[in-house]
Amino acid sequence: MTFSPDSRFLAAGYEDGTVKIWDSASGALVNTIQLTIQSTACTAASLDISSDGKTAAFLVFYRAGTDSVVGRIKLWDLAANRETAEFSSDAGTVSLSPDAERVVMAGWDGTVSVWNIKSQKRENHFTKSEGGYASAAFSPDGAQLAMSWSQGRSVRLWNFSYRSEVRVFTQDGGAQSVSFSPDGQMLVSQGLPDAKTGAVEFRLWDLKSGNQILEFEVKAGSVGFRKNGDIMAVSAEGRTVKVWNARTKASIKTFDCNGNVLFTLFSPDGSLAGAGLDDCTFYLAQI
């Protein structure tokens, strides 16, 4: 599930191969996309939307034969509502560069590949894996790529212009995802859930100095940024969702849902907090 970069729309992929897009203000369903591969039903497992809101990337899986599962990356023109390209993929997640000229595929095998969309040729392939599955994210200006591994101890920052690694950050116990602040000045790494408590450790890094700014834990949580640069955290306990300032610990908002919360997220502009429930419904709250 993801927001459009302008926070106007919310998109989700389903096991039957459909992708639904809603207006985040009204809750109205505005588009339904049916994805198939060679007329075969597939599952939409991951998706991303470009910064201009014109292009979407979908990671889909389908069963080929009895024991074989095949992955594909589909690129979609949202205005024309049609597929524009397709890539073979063993990835677990997919992300678009802000200008929609590149797509990065982070694999279950720990590899990370960057492909040029126009030429459909691979530009970069990172095989240095510290174990487990990989995660990757483009910086807001598209100049850098952050990578992490679920069984590793580092988050690595690659610069496309320098064609080299420029920073390495430490995340003990592995990181399941990485993301940049909207201004590109900070990086957030998200650890793995604690086996006993379910709490997840987040670390906030300053990219210029390389120093760690903040470290905190939340349960079933995620982080987001306000326009003024404040970092927010949202956590869930059963049916209750709490939003707070990660720096000051001050409470921002608390709301209850009609079901157990499985995951949470923020809109890119920091104005909305969302919660996905165990009955496949989704809550949005103004913050």
Image: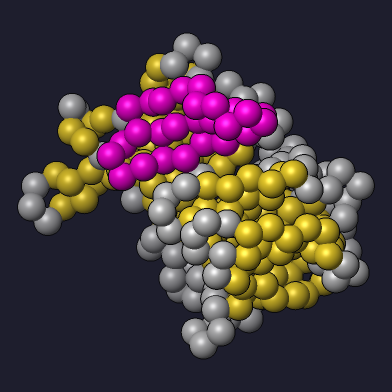
- Between residue 180 and residue 154, name the one nearer to us: 180
Quadrant of the image occupied by residue 272: top right
- Between residue 254 and residue 133, name the one nearer to us: 254
Q: Residue at x 78, y 58 (%)?
A: 253
Q: Is residue 247 visible?
A: no
Residue 174: in magenta span: no
Q: Is residue 119 above or below residue 62?
A: above
Q: Is residue 263 above or below residue 213?
A: above
Give percent across and percent down for residue 144: 69, 47
Give percent across and percent down for residue 29: 50, 26
- Between residue 128 and residue 221, name the one nearer to us: 221
Query: What's the magenta region?
Result: 8-34
Q: Is residue 17 visible?
A: yes
Number of marks in picture: 0
Give percent across and percent down for residue 34: 33, 27
Give percent across and percent down for residue 96: 56, 37
Quadrant of the image occupied by residue 160: top right
| Colour style of the rendered protein structure | secondary structure
Residue 11: in magenta span: yes
Q: Residue at x 58, y 21 (%)?
A: 54
Q: Residue farthest to the top?
A: 80
Q: Is residue 89 left or right of residue 81?
A: left
Q: Residue at x 78, y 48 (%)?
A: 287
Q: Residue at x 88, y 51 (%)?
A: 229
Q: Main secondary structure of the magenta part?
A: strand
- Between residue 99 and residue 78, name the one nearer to us: 78
